[in-house]
Image (tube, rainbow, N blue to C red):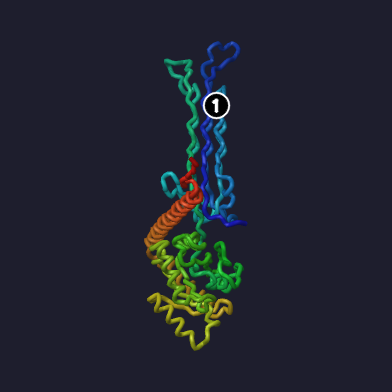
Amino acid sequence: MKFVDEVMITVEAGKGGNGCMSFRREKYIPKGGPDGGDGGDGGSVYFEASESLNTLVDFRFTRRFKSDNGQGGMSRDCTGAKGEDLILEVPVGTTIIDTDTDEVLIDLTEIGQREKIAQGGFHGLGNTRFKSSVNRAPRQTTKGSIGETRNLKLELKILADVGLLGLPNAGKSTFIRAVSAAKPKVANYPFTTLVPNLGVVRIEKHRSFVIADIPGIIEGAAEGAGLGIRFLKHLARNRLLLHIVDMAPWDDVSPAEAAEVAVTELGKFSGTLAEQPRWLVLNKLDMVPEEEREERCQSVVDALNWEGPVYRISAIGREGTDALAREIQTFLDDRLYAIEEDPSILDQEHAIREQIDVEARARIEELRLSRGRAEAADDVDDDYDDDDYDIEVEWVRE
């Protein structure tokens, strides 16, 4: 199934049913009085987080959704039926944004969470409602109100505790295969991973965490090159980033230069995301001669001016991966204990994630606009023809 993490849709709530104007007509009752019923309320539009979905592909081709209108009122004081609500299922981790106001309406982060996005129209009133002591035969009714219409942007961010960051072919997918039961595609060429992958790492029976693997980023990603810039937003919900560095690169780029590229592009994408907890993981050390390992590792640390944790592993041989996974679990457990003691830490996390989302949307929108301007300029150049501006000279023999 195609992975789609961003779509634009329109939702429209149902219109309320109109009130009915009717008078009671019955044998031997010449003046029965009004008996027009009210209309029914229009159906509302809800979004619900479903654990059975992992992509927004269902919204790719159907872009407009409308709930049912309310039924009109009827005689004999019969109220019209309420319009059926429309419930749209989306993956857990979907953020719903109103594109007209740029307001974040809701963030669906729990299974079964249901939120109303568009309110259905209010029902109209029948003429029975307007009967009074001075007006025994009212002919006044009201129409049902129009339901809300919203232009929405759905953004899916995968929910994971740990995110993997690095250049293509650094061994991110191999690492996730080594520590979890996930089996992402692995090959000896760049951009093997085209969509995010999730894996559950089980340390003990009741101790586990979720790790996310996203496509690698390349130099110039902040300007739109490669795939990684599109998926970096999925790291916004992670509590820890693992920066995986290929210590035996296939090209002429040194490990230190590759590490600097990843950090630079991450900072351009979101300065707040670049400041989040990050560990340095030096991978593929089994392919480096033993006498060169220390020098290569130190060159990466020096190039980044790194002062945080450093781990040396070989993901394909599972050397050092189990110890790293246990360290990650300990870090996450300590984080949870700290939140239990001081709940304000959780509020700080939410504020940081919102800031990352704002920076990510601004950066992605900036890239889209620049790309659109570039395409428009290309179209102008294609239409240009030197012959259109040539001066034709006609020679006439006298």
Q: Position of residue 85 (x, y in %)?
A: 55, 40
Q: Position of residue 115 (x, y in %)?
A: 49, 47
For disc 1, the neighbor class at 10 Å (few under 14, some 14 to 19, many from 20) is: many
Does 390 appear above or below 291? Answer: above
Query: Which residue is more in the foreground, 169 or 128?
Result: 169
Q: Which part of the image, by quadrant, shows the N terminus?
A: bottom right
Identity of the residue drawn at 44% across and 70% down: 261
Identity of the residue drawn at 50% across and 48% down: 387
Does 278 appear above or below 224? Answer: below
Q: Residue furthest bottom?
A: 291
Query: For the image shown, how many numbered marks are present on the structure?
Result: 1
Residue 205 in view of the camera: no
- The secondary structure type at the circle numbered 1 is loop
> What amino acid is labelled 1 in the image?
Gly
Does 84 appear above or below 24? Answer: below
Q: Position of residue 358 (x, y in %)?
A: 41, 55
Left or right of 355: which side holds 242? Answer: right
Residue 318 in view of the camera: yes
The residue labelled by disc 1 is 73
Identity of the residue drawn at 57% across and 22% down: 76
Q: Position of residue 340 (x, y in %)?
A: 41, 64
Left or right of 316: which side holds 371? Answer: left
Residue 181 lies in quadrant: bottom right
